[in-house]
Image (cartoon, rainbow, N blue to C red):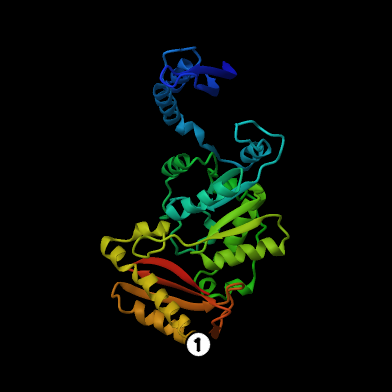
Amino acid sequence: MFVHVYEIIYYSNILSAKLVRLKLRCDFSRLTLTSIAYAVQFLYVPLLTMSAAAAIACTARRSTMSASVKVYQTVPEFREARKLLRKVDTDGKILPLLPDVGFVPTMGALHRGHLSLLKQAQQENDVVVCSIFVNPTQFGPTEDLDRYPRQLERDCELLQELGIEHVFAPSSVESMYSKYHVTSVDPGICFEQTEEGKSRPGHFKGVATVVTKLLNIVQPTRAYFGQKDAAQCVLIKRIVNDLNMNLDIIVGDTVREDDGLAMSSRNAYLSASERSAAPIIYQSLLKARELFQSKECVASCDLIDVVEQTLKTQPLVREIQYVSVDCRETMQTLTKVHYQEGAIVSLACRIGSVRLIDNIVLQ
């Protein structure tokens, strides 16, 4: 049975004449600490102090944290919930207005980079949705699909601590790609011929397809992506523009560890010695920025050379897959970089067996 919204007024004998108004909705079919704590506040208790009331409310909030994150495992389930989203004013009153919805798509194994995007989305929108889906179509046959970390329970704990209420986490691949699925979004040769595209054939087609599907399902006002995946960010902006999608794409700065290593779910693969070696990646990119800032115009080959030579000073860098200097708007290769125009310097390398990517924006 439900006890509907009541307005309860009680006062403190310490802070006299201080009125506190609480609005409460609780489910008495579950006799939990939460229900009991809130039930106490239903009573008119003249001797209840403000500090005691705060303690009860705090305990109640902590005990309801697990219930505050709503996980939707199918598209129909999420779409039903999406229909009900409305604006809420500062007093908690539901308004008959459609909310601004911020969306942060992820593959899970959340880290501070993801959380920074979610926090930005919270600041700029009424409601935030996070998706967690390890998309098989963007992995090559020899890549780490089976190994990729999956930790939905821990991710939901992080999201609830942040106050994110809506999580779209398809329970199976079939939830996103039906039995007779044949349609995909192909960005064409422009992205397949980028250095990242050549290193991972089919990757950008997989990314373009799943992101288009997610944007169609969630229908956000704004979607948030991290700069660490530079080519992906350019691709998604291109898709939204080319297909006339009604949303804004927001790119957040790369979040780094104290030693400069870009946050990545794949950092968990690194051994202790590999992790100690990994900051060389960002150090090599900083060398490129130093060279760029020293001249009005610099040849791309010189930028590539300084990055590669820096990487080679670290013995645990087993392979340099590529270093690329590209246009910030199109990711097309540049032969030289003018100071006023800038560029993106991107790289992929293996430290031990772990493939890591990073980039720096020259501007």
Q: Is residue 238 visible?
A: yes
Percent across and percent down for residue 108 are 47, 50
Q: Which residue is mark 1?
A: 299
Q: Position of residue 54 (x, y in %)?
A: 42, 26
Q: Residues within 10 Å of mark 1 (few under 14, many from 20)?
A: some
Quadrant hosting residue 2: top right
Q: Is residue 224 above or below residue 228?
A: above
Give the side of residue 126 with respect to residue 57, left or right. Answer: right
Residue at point 65%, 66% (across, down): 238
Give the residue at the far left of this rendering.
273
Total numbered circles = 1
Closer to us: 76 or 94: 94
- The location of residue 145, given as percent across then percent down, is 46, 57
Q: Nearer the viewer, residue 202 or 281?
A: 281
Horizontally, residue 11 falls left or right of residue 259, namely right
Pick whichever, 234 or 319, lies toward us: 234
Residue 266 position by quadrant: bottom left
- Label 1 secondary element: strand
Which residue does the image show at 67% across and 55% down from the upper left? 247
- Which image quarter holds the N terminus? top right
In the depicted structure, whether residue 113 falls above or below residue 126: below
| Residue 71 vs residue 297, the one in the foreground | 297
Percent position of residue 325, x then y: 51, 79
Q: Amino acid at mark 1?
A: Ala
Does residue 133 appear anywhere in the picture? no
Among all residues in the image, which is located at the extreme front? 16
